[in-house]
Each structure stands twice: as structure tokens, then as C-alpha cells.
């Protein structure tokens, strides 16, 4: 697409960025050089702390001035913008270069209408009159494919969903017809089907407007789909740069290869029956060990360890002067499933589909409205507080965010030993031995017991959280998005750890996740949830290779696959938004029927 | 099973006495500690220091400016101000610290219960707190002190009870924020009871702003004790406290400014001292700060 003779839109030479810390300057981006040609998409990919976002902020000179230092040269249309004054720079931002960010929920001002926020930019920067600006705003909203653009002009940000807000942000960025769009993780906070829509939109707009895009992401799948060229960053350095296809197929740097092998690929399990560990790559040599298929841990046929029948959880919606109940969030609607010893059942779905509420309801961390839950012999719904406390010995939970799931004021050892001691499972000395043993089991060392959580990285904290969950020797673990917040390589490690624990301890996992590729790797069976209901459930291979329900198909089609051959694909996903599970008081949930596709594979009949 | 991050982390060697070391490294909090220690020492040593009787009047030395005989001057009854300052430190420091201790000891648990349980417990505690807050702090203190009878002890109780609602509200607000953290749900999911969750998971994580508020309230309490003394409800004349000295001094601001200067400066210093110490304590007690 780009020709060698044209001058690049953006040309970065030896960019280094340092931050002031207590002990002098710390360099976080070192010697980064790259070009973005006209009409080209370049992706910067890396894990957290790789310096990819700092790079983009440096380009826009958006870092705090006194405490940061940018060295090198950044040419935008041949002009070195690092030499510009702050006033001149303001003319560049939002004019020649526009930027969109990760969080569409917080980047719009909630007290002004969408239309006003966009037209204000046009009036200020383009000198348009109010009526010209209105026409142009509607045109921009139509351009980003917001349905009924003119009627939504006077709506407020809270009336827009996350995906729609990101469209508004893009419309705003397009207002000045920039030559370069910097997109910093623009789809990370969005659900996968919405992410697909936004990626499609960016591709279309790029063709229509002929602008260049600098795309910052951690997701190799997104990179493969969108980028002409890719820059891989690792700990502040540019380790590799090149044509996307070359990077994916013939990556030279061991880190690139390690990163790629750690990325779960949807469809990579096509010929396997059982969950499979992630291949481990040595970061020094880039050699990958063949993934080992694990042995079968599931004990079917006997009574299930966990049996859920017709579970319903609703939250009242109150409004008005006397807080009368005016409706209900039907978070979990008539959900039934079984889980056997040593089995992993995954609940997948997008945000708001009720998968987390289901997990919490079966533990009665949230009180379900009705239904039957039998877990390891307990009739969960009938338990009194004492019985409920005993139930905790059978079922444990691992949370999503390892930074908030450990008490910052409690040492790691105390946190792991606490459940053991509180349930009076042994003496203080035994608790100590148990803690040491568990720390070793999750791949840490026993002498870390007197450290505090803040001393560990995210992946290590998640291991600690797992050790704590194991301290009561539970039979079932509810893993609620337990690997979602982790970097790719760490995610692979923690998944492997969970699989190893299942091999050794015969634990059953209720694995709640929105990440289809991880789910495919670790599960025995999969249940797809939509608007509080299970729309499809069955053995992993059946659901992934022969999806029946339209929603399952849509979900799978939306997952970005790290395969550069898919670059430029259009999903043609319609602009549907996720529906809301909030219903009025008179709502009667329809009676659902399920059709058997094959052994154990059931799909909801519409 | 390493891909990129080494699993066994290289951690800095564990330091012993971390809190104290951090405290020492913070110059501000050391200054605060020195100031408070200085006044506390004076207060404790008052009986054995070679100073004149703080209540002995002398008609020959009324409102004398600072001199070799009276380092800090004399007051309207000819009493030695230095001596009264030193003895007054006892009443004032005690009034400040003990009344705040009362406020914290009663207010924090109620705030904790209120925020943690919510529902009618919360409604009940909050309505009472709001009723107390609706009355001006000093009026409540005066009413309570008058009801309990005039003495320094009763004044401290009155001040403590009047300052308590602030701590209820502050604690409740903090608890509401911490309650939604995953680790609290984590504690429930491992089967811990309410008492454990409140004392081991919530309380330690809400304490920082409470400590800061407490040091600020010490200042308010010292001044409140002064006001009560002025009304005859606090320290009983002729026994001195900084507050009562200040109250008398305000009638002689132009003739004898030193009468107001010394107790004013002392209150100012002690308040600064408590604030600096509070800041340092907050940081030192937090394991996340290194």
C-alpha cells in the first residue's frame, strides 16, 4: 500500500522517554524508531510495562512536563514536533493527529449532549457556525455508523452503550480530518462482538478517509487482523519490527516467538479431546516445548459434584419517591447444569450475561431468587449461616483482579493460612506447613509467606489467590475471569497451573470467562450464556466445532484470531447492541426448550 | 514452567521494624514527634521543675512583660505565665488526646457496624449521628458538660461525645468503599464470619483517614476545652489550661499581648506536631508504601 518514495506521515527516530523517580531518571522507552506511511496501519504490541502506551503519549507530548523527558526526533509530515512550543503543539493535537483511548465510559463529559460535544470541536477548531456544525456532526455520526444519527444528536453519553460511545469518540477524532489516528487499546474494554464492530469500523474509515493508524494493543489477534506492519515492544525496547505476516510466521526475536506461542488461538484444539497445556517457550532461545495433552480427570456417570437446577437470580430495580420496585434485572434465568469431579465447565458470554452472578449464586455469595443447588451433598439453598460456612470447605472462588482480591494489610502467609485456621482444620504449626506446601504447589517459594501482596506482580498474586483457595482442599473452584486481567504470557502460565492442579487434585472448575480461546483450551464442557440464560451447552469440541445457536456463532465469529492471513477480513457484524436483562414487573420469562444436537450437546430452541 | 516472568520473584530482603524505620526516614513526622514529646515531657515533669506556683498571685507583678524573673511574663493576677504554661500543658494535652480517644473508640465501631451491615442498622445509627451533627459541635459539648457537671474529666467526656459523630460518618464512608473490594468478598467466600471480616479485612484498610482526622480533631478538642474552661465547665480556675489562659488573655490583647501569644503559640505547635505525626503514622503503617 505504501510506496518507498513518499515521505512517511509519522517518522520516529531514536525516541527515548524517561520519568523522574525518587532516585533519578528512569528510562521506560529506549531507542524506538519507526515510520507510519500514508494510509498504513502500524501496530505497537506488547504486554503491560512494555512502554507501548508511553510511546504513544510521548508522540503526542501528553506526558507531564517537569517529571518526564523525551529524547529523539518525531517527524509529523516532515516537521519535528518535539521541537515545537507547547502552543504550536496544541494546534497539532486533534488537528493533524487525533487520539482515541481505552475507556469510552469516562472519556465523554456526562453533562453535555453527544451532539454538543462534537459540534463544539467543529465550532472552535474549524470556525463553523452552529448550524453548519450540526450538519457536519450528524454526518460524522453517520460515518461511524451510529443508527438514527440525527435523532441521537441531543442524547447524553449515558444513553449510549460502551461500543456506541467508542464510535462517538472516533467521530470526534475524525472531526478534524486527521492524517494520523492514534488508537490506544481502543477495543480492550469492549465485549468481543462489539470489539469486532469497532475493528471493522476503523478499517472502513481508514479506506474512506485515507488516514494512517497507529494502533496500540496487547492483543495479538487484533494485530493480526488490522496491522500492515507490527512493532513488538518488550520492557521499553523495540525488539522486533516488520511486516505483520513476517512477524507472525517468521519472528526472529525469542520474545516475539514466546509471546505468539502463549497466545491462545481459537480453533487450535480442533483435533484434541482433552484440555491441553499451553506450550512453554524459552524466552532466551525461543524454543517451544510441545504441549502435552493431559489425562482424563473427569469421573462421569456417578452423581455430579455440583448440580444446579432452574436457578433464578433477580435484582429488584427501584425508582420513584417511595423506592417502589418497578422492575427487575433478570441476571440469571432458569439456569441448569451439572459439574462432575475433575471436570472443567466453562460459562462463557459477554458482560451482563449473568455468568458471574451464576457463579456467586451457587456459592450464595449472592442470594438466588429460586432454584436448587446441590453441591458435594449439601442442599445449598437450605443452609443456615453455620452450614454455609461449612460449605466453603467444598467450594472456593478465585477472582478476576489479583490487585484487589488480596487484603493489602495481611501478609501472604497469613492470608493463605487464615481459612485453614478459622475452619479449625489443624494447629498453627500445621497451618504453617500447609501454607509452605501450598506456596510451593503454585510455583512460589515457602519463604515468601511473610511478604505483603504489593511486593508481587499480578501473575504471582493470582498464584497466591489460588493457594488461598486451595487451603481448604475444596472439590469445586469457581474461577471468575481468573486469567482475564493477566498478560498473555502470564495467562498461559496460570492456565497451565490450573490444569496441573486439576491433574493432581481432581478439582472441578466452574470456569467463568469471556475469552473464547482460553475456554477452548481448558474446558471439558462449555455453556454459552446470553441474557441470563444458557443458550447452548455441551462438550467443548461439539460446541466449538459445531455451534448451533446463532449467538454462539456470532460470538465465535467475533473473536480475533492471531493469524495474519485473516488481515482485512470483514465480519459484517450488524451494529446490534447487547440487549438489557432489565424487565418490567409484568414480564413472564418464556418457557424454553432445548434440542439435543448430539450426546450432551443441547441448544435452546428459539 | 516459565514463559517470560520468572516465577520465583527476586524480592528485596525483608526489613525488620519496617514501620519504625519508615517513620524515622520521614523528617516531618520526626519533628512532630519531637514537638509532642517536648510538651508531654514538660507536662509530666511539672511537679519537679523549679518553677513558681502556677496559681500564686502577686499584686506587685501584674501583666509584666517577659523578663529575667518571669521568662514569659505574668498575667492579669500577677501569676507566672511560664509556670502556668507548663502546668496548663497537662490539662490541654489530656483534653486533646483523651477526648479524641473517646470519640474514636466509640465512633469508629459504630461507623464500622453502620457501613458493614447497612439496612436498618445503618439507618438507625445514621439518624442518630445526623441528629448529633445537626447541633453545633460546641453547643453539644457545652450542653453535655453542663449536664455532667463542671470538671476537666467531664469536659473531656463531653468533647469526646460531641466529636464522635464525625468519626461515625468518616468510618462509614470508608467502609462502604472498602466493602466492595474483592478481598472482602474473598473473605466471605472462604467462610469467615462478620467479626473477622470487620476487624481483619475492613478496619485496617479504613484506618489511614481516621488517624489523620484524629490528629486534626486533637486541635479542635484543645480549643473546645478552652471554651468550656471559659464558661467554667472545663478546667476549674485557678488551675491553668492553655485554653483558659487564652480566654482570659483576649481581654488584654493590647496591654499584654504576651498573655495570648504563649498559649496561642503552644496550641499551634502541638496541633502542627499532631498533624505531622499523623501523616507520618499513616504512611508508616501502610505496608504498600516503601
Image: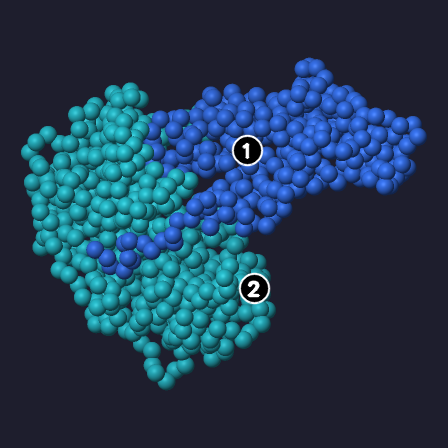
The numbered mark at residue A66 is 2
Residue found at x 86% / y 26%: B57
Chain letter, disc 1 residue: B
Q: Which residue is mark 1?
A: B170
Residue found at x 31% / y 73%: A241
* Horizontal and vertical percent position of residue A533: 24, 36
Q: Are marks 2 and 1 in contact (CB under 8 Å)?
A: no
- Nearer the observer, A7 or A549: A7
Which corner quadrant of the image does residue A383 belong to?
top left
Any idea which chain is the cyan one in this picture?
A
Taking the image as shown, residue B238 lies to the left or right of residue A503, namely right
Taking the image as shown, residue A554 lies to the left or right of residue B264, namely left
Whether residue A102 is visible to the viewer of this picture, yes or no, is: yes
* Horizontal and vertical percent position of residue A333: 26, 32
Taking the image as shown, residue A131 lies to the left or right of residue B113, namely right
Q: Residues within 10 Å of mark 2 (few under 14, many from 20)?
A: few
Amino acid at each position: 500500500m505504501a510506496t518507498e518514495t513518499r515521505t512517511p506521515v509519522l517518522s520516529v527516530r531514536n525516541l527515548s522517554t524517561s520519568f523522574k523517580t525518587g532516585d533519578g531518571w528512569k528510562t521506560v522507552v529506549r531507542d524506538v524508531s519507526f515510520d507510519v506511511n500514508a494510509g498504513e496501519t502500524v501496530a505497537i504490541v506488547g504486554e503491560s510495562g512494555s512502554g507501548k502506551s508511553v510511546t504513544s503519549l510521548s508522540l503526542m507530548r501528553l506526558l507531564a512536563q517537569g517529571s518526564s523527558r523525551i529524547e529523539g526526533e518525531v517527524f509529523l509530515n516532515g516537521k519535528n514536533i518535539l521541537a515545537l512550543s507547547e502552543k504550536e503543539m496544541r494546534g497539532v493535537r486533534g488537528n493533524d493527529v487525533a487520539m482515541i483511548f481505552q475507556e469510552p465510559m469516562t472519556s465523554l463529559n456526562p453533562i453535555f449532549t453527544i451532539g454538543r460535544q462534537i459540534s463544539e470541536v467543529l465550532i472552535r477548531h474549524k470556525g463553523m457556525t452552529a448550524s453548519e456544525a450540526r450538519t457536519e456532526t450528524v454526518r460524522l455520526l453517520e460515518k461511524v455508523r451510529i443508527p438514527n444519527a440525527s435523532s441521537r444528536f441531543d442524547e447524553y453519553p449515558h444513553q449510549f452503550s460502551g461500543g456506541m460511545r467508542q464510535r462517538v469518540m472516533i467521530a470526534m477524532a475524525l472531526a478534524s480530518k486527521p492524517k494520523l489516528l492514534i488508537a490506544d487499546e481502543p477495543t480492550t474494554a469492549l465485549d468481543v462482538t462489539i470489539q469486532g464492530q469497532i475493528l471493522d469500523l476503523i478499517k472502513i474509515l481508514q479506506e474512506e478517509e485515507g488516514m494512517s493508524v497507529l494502533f496500540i494493543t496487547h492483543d495479538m489477534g487484533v494485530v493480526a487482523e488490522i496491522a500492515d506492519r507490527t512493532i513488538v515492544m518488550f520492557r521499553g525496547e523495540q525488539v522486533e519490527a516488520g511486516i505483520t505476516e513476517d512477524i507472525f510466521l517468521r519472528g526472529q526475536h525469542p520474545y516475539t516467538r514466546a509471546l505468539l506461542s502463549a497466545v491462545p488461538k481459537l480453533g487450535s484444539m480442533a483435533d484434541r479431546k482433552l484440555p491441553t497445556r499451553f506450550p512453554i517457550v524459552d524466552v532466551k532461545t525461543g524454543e517451544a516445548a510441545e504441549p502435552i495433552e493431559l489425562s482424563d480427570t473427569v469421573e462421569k456417570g456417578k452423581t455430579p459434584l455440583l448440580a444446579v437446577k432452574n436457578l433464578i437470580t433477580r435484582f429488584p430495580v427501584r425508582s420513584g419517591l417511595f423506592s417502589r420496585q418497578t422492575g427487575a434485572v433478570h441476571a440469571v434465568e432458569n439456569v441448569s447444569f451439572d459439574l462432575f469431579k475433575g471436570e472443567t465447565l466453562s460459562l462463557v458470554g459477554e458482560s451482563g450475561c449473568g455468568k458471574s452472578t451464576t457463579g456467586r449464586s451457587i456459592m450464595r455469595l449472592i442470594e438466588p431468587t429460586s432454584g436448587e443447588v446441590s453441591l458435594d451433598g449439601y442442599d445449598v439453598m437450605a443452609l443456615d449461616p453455620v452450614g454455609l460456612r461449612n460449605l466453603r470447605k467444598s467450594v472456593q472462588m478465585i477472582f478476576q483482579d489479583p490487585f484487589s482480591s488480596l487484603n493489602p494489610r495481611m501478609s501472604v502467609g497469613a492470608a493463605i493460612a487464615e481459612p485453614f485456621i478459622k475452619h479449625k482444620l489443624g494447629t498453627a504449626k500445621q497451618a504453617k506447613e500447609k501454607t509452605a506446601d501450598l506456596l510451593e504447589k503454585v510455583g512460589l517459594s515457602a519463604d515468601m509467606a511473610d511478604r505483603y501482596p504489593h511486593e508481587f506482580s499480578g501473575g504471582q498474586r493470582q498464584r497466591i489467590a489460588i493457594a488461598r483457595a486451595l487451603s481448604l482442599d475444596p472439590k469445586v473452584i469457581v474461577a471468575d475471569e481468573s486469567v482475564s486481567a493477566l498478560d498473555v504470557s502470564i495467562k498461559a502460565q496460570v492456565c497451565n497451573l490450573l490444569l496441573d492442579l486439576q491433574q493432581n487434585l481432581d478439582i472441578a472448575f466452574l470456569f467463568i470467562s469471556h475469552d473464547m480461546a482460553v475456554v477452548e483450551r481448558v474446558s471439558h464442557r462449555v455453556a454459552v450464556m446470553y441474557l441470563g440464560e444458557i443458550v447452548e451447552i455441551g462438550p467443548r469440541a461439539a460446541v466449538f466445532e459445531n455451534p448451533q445457536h446463532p449467538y454462539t456463532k456470532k460470538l465465535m465469529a467475533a473473536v480475533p484470531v492471531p493469524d495474519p492471513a485473516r488481515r482485512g477480513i470483514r465480519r459484517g457484524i450488524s451494529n446490534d447492541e447487547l440487549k438489557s436483562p432489565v424487565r418490567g414487573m409484568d414480564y413472564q420469562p418464556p418457557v424454553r426448550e432445548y434440542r439435543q444436537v448430539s450426546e450432551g450437546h443441547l441448544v435452546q430452541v428459539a | 514452567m516459565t514463559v517470560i516472568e520468572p516465577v520465583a520473584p527476586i524480592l528485596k530482603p525483608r526489613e525488620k521494624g519496617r514501620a519504625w524505620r519508615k517513620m524515622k526516614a520521614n523528617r516531618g513526622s520526626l519533628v512532630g514527634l519531637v514537638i509532642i514529646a517536648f510538651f508531654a515531657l514538660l507536662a509530666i515533669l511539672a511537679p519537679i521543675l523549679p518553677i513558681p506556683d502556677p496559681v500564686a498571685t502577686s499584686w506587685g507583678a501584674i501583666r509584666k512583660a517577659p523578663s529575667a524573673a518571669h521568662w514569659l511574663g505574668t498575667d492579669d493576677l500577677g501569676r507566672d505565665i511560664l509556670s502556668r504554661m507548663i502546668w496548663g500543658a497537662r490539662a490541654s494535652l489530656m483534653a486533646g488526646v483523651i477526648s479524641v480517644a473517646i470519640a474514636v473508640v466509640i465512633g469508629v465501631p459504630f461507623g464500622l457496624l453502620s457501613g458493614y451491615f447497612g439496612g436498618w442498622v445503618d439507618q438507625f445509627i445514621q439518624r442518630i449521628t445526623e441528629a448529633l451533627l445537626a447541633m453545633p459541635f460546641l453547643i453539644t459539648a457545652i450542653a453535655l458538660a453542663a449536664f455532667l457537671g463542671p470538671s476537666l474529666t467531664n469536659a473531656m467526656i463531653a468533647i469526646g461525645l460531641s466529636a464522635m459523630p464525625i468519626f461515625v460518618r468518616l468510618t462509614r464512608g470508608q467502609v462502604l468503599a472498602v466493602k466492595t473490594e474483592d478481598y472482602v468478598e474473598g473473605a466471605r467466600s472462604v467462610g469467615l464470619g462478620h467479626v473477622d471480616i470487620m476487624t481483619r479485612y475492613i478496619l485496617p484498610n479504613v484506618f489511614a483517614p481516621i488517624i489523620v482526622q484524629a490528629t486534626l480533631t486533637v486541635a479542635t478538642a484543645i480549643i473546645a476545652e478552652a471554651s468550656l474552661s471559659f464558661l467554667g465547665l472545663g478546667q476549674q480556675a485557678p488551675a491553668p489550661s492553655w485554653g483558659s489562659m487564652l480566654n482570659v488573655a483576649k481581654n488584654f490583647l493590647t496591654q499584654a499581648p504576651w498573655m495570648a501569644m504563649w498559649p496561642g503559640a503552644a496550641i499551634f505547635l502541638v496541633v502542627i506536631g499532631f498533624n505531622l505525626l499523623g501523616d507520618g503514622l499513616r504512611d508508616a503503617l501502610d505496608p504498600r508504601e516503601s
